[in-house]
Image (spheres, coloured by chain):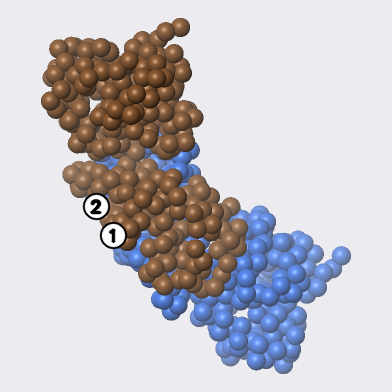
Chain colours: A brown, B blue
Amino acid sequence: MMLKKIGFIGLGIMGKPMAKNLIKAGYSLVVYDIFDAAVEELNAAGAETASSPKDVAEKCETIITMLPNGPQVKEVVTGAGGILEASVIGRIVIDMSSISPIVSKEMYDECKKKGIRFMDAPVSGGEPKAKDGTLAIMVGCDEDDFEQNVSLLKCMGSSVVRTGEIGSGNVTKLANQIIVALNIAAVSEAFTLATKAGVDPQCVFDAIKGGLAGSTVMNAKIPMILERNFNPGFKIDLHIKDLANALDTAHSIGVPVPLTSVIMEIMQALRVDGKGQNDHGSVVQFYEKLAQVEVKS
Amino acid sequence: MMLKKIGFIGLGIMGKPMAKNLIKAGYSLVVYDIFDAAVEELNAAGAETASSPKDVAEKCETIITMLPNGPQVKEVVTGAGGILEASVIGRIVIDMSSISPIVSKEMYDECKKKGIRFMDAPVSGGEPKAKDGTLAIMVGCDEDDFEQNVSLLKCMGSSVVRTGEIGSGNVTKLANQIIVALNIAAVSEAFTLATKAGVDPQCVFDAIKGGLAGSTVMNAKIPMILERNFNPGFKIDLHIKDLANALDTAHSIGVPVPLTSVIMEIMQALRVDGKGQNDHGSVVQFYEKLAQVEVKS
């Protein structure tokens, strides 16, 4: 069965496998990206191509965007050759990028003026889960739009949760990224203390992982840290992008976030130290350097 | 079967149920506490009583201590009427208090001079697990002492892990307490942001708990926070004690702990605000006040 035609803009590390999963599920795709190689790969997989976001919007009623950050989403929606230049109404834009919820709301308002709906549906889980179609998708939109699009989203994610109105998906994603960053810092600070105190970190892990200190971050990152494996995973540079959006959003609505500001500075220090492309588990290396802990690497 | 005689010093909220579990397991107990009521209760449960820690040490080869902090352990071991005043050798002191590992090592050295062994074996899990005999026990001592005492410890805990030599139990406990405090702060900061942004915290919880942000702290504390239940559990005042020991220990061995210092100040602010007897989940109330978030209570 051929399902409805879907536009897909943004074929990067995440977007490409997500788009392929839609083709696998039987959707007909019209794709656009500024990089030709990604477009050609999707074309070979059966997707039609478009010459601009405007062109995508003219060809498809539903348009998914998966872009690096807010400025790119603004450009694709409101820029020259953007979605809003198409002479169409009744379209829906599903923005799956991780951006500031402030930008999500701006885009919602801009689209509404032109009779186009906009929802935010950022994901978590990274490239492996994008490939498997098992992302966690956090969706901000009204209930009708959720009902109409949930089956489409389920081709890309195993958990699709409506978190509230427009922007709530990205607020939830920022909450997620704050917690992940701080939980990594927590285990890094604690394990560096234990290591310099001469206690085997594997023993500490075994002794505490089953109790109140236990976390998915501890289970995922401590084994990597013990193996000195800092291959991403999720890069420091990307986490910095999310924390910048978190700080902007928090300050714009009047929420002081003292710990988020500290972990932001720690990640900035790691970037200065040439570790921006490392996995965010590399936060432990900030502490090891600070404490001059010798670790075999 | 009547097992060997065990001395038990410190019958507080934790010590009392732990001592009772030893009686249930068939051990003969000699108890001491500065509060008569606790001693009488154990006496009624079949324990012999002693007039001082010295008296306990004269009557028992194995002496468990479960005291509030380092100064009390020092007093009981090296003070007037203390364990080291007993004219005995070959005794072993198992200190199950949560104290600074620096004090654990000092006590080990003081005891060694008198031919007495000392091990640190702090616990986590709180009063409910003390009652059930399902504490997590982190043990610092040599392998022989561990082998000789592990069956005794298993009457009080479901997880008994040797973490290394003397002091390593308390280092592990401090690592645990740092992580727990920071994981609570992480969810508090993130959920206060979401709440003030107008997103239902229950939706945020549902959307993120299964991913990398998931933690035992989130699963335990978010439902309490949503119910505005700040009954301890584990009190802010006690967590402050542990963080003070963590900061002391970290600084004494040259480990800067920037995030631990911030969560310490947050808990100090809560204590100033009259919330020292609240559960440590009350950290969210620091953020709510800071952000002037209105929450039904």
Give the side of residue A74 with respect to residue B92, left or right.
left
Residue type highlighted by circle 1: Val
Query: From the viewer's perspective, is residue B121 above or below residue B196?
Result: below
- Judge if badges 2 and 1 mark residues of a common chain: yes
Kindly identify the residue that appears in the image at 67 percent across and 62 percent down: B160
Q: Mark 2 lies on which chain?
A: A
User: x%, y% of residue B127?
Assistant: 57, 58
Disc on the earlier residue, 2 or 1: 2
Residue type highlighted by circle 2: Pro
Badge 2 local density, few (<14 within 10 Å), some, or many (20+)? many
Residue A122: quadrant of the picture: top left
- SS label for mark 2: loop
Give the side of residue B49 with respect to residue B2, left or right.
left
Give the side of residue A81 with respect to residue A123, left or right.
left
Kindly identify the residue that appears in the image at 71 percent across and 61 percent down: B154
Badge 1 local density, few (<14 within 10 Å), some, or many (20+)? few
Residue A104: quadrant of the picture: top left
Mark 2 highlights which residue? A256
Mark 1 highlights which residue? A272
Viewer-proximal residue, A237 or B22? A237
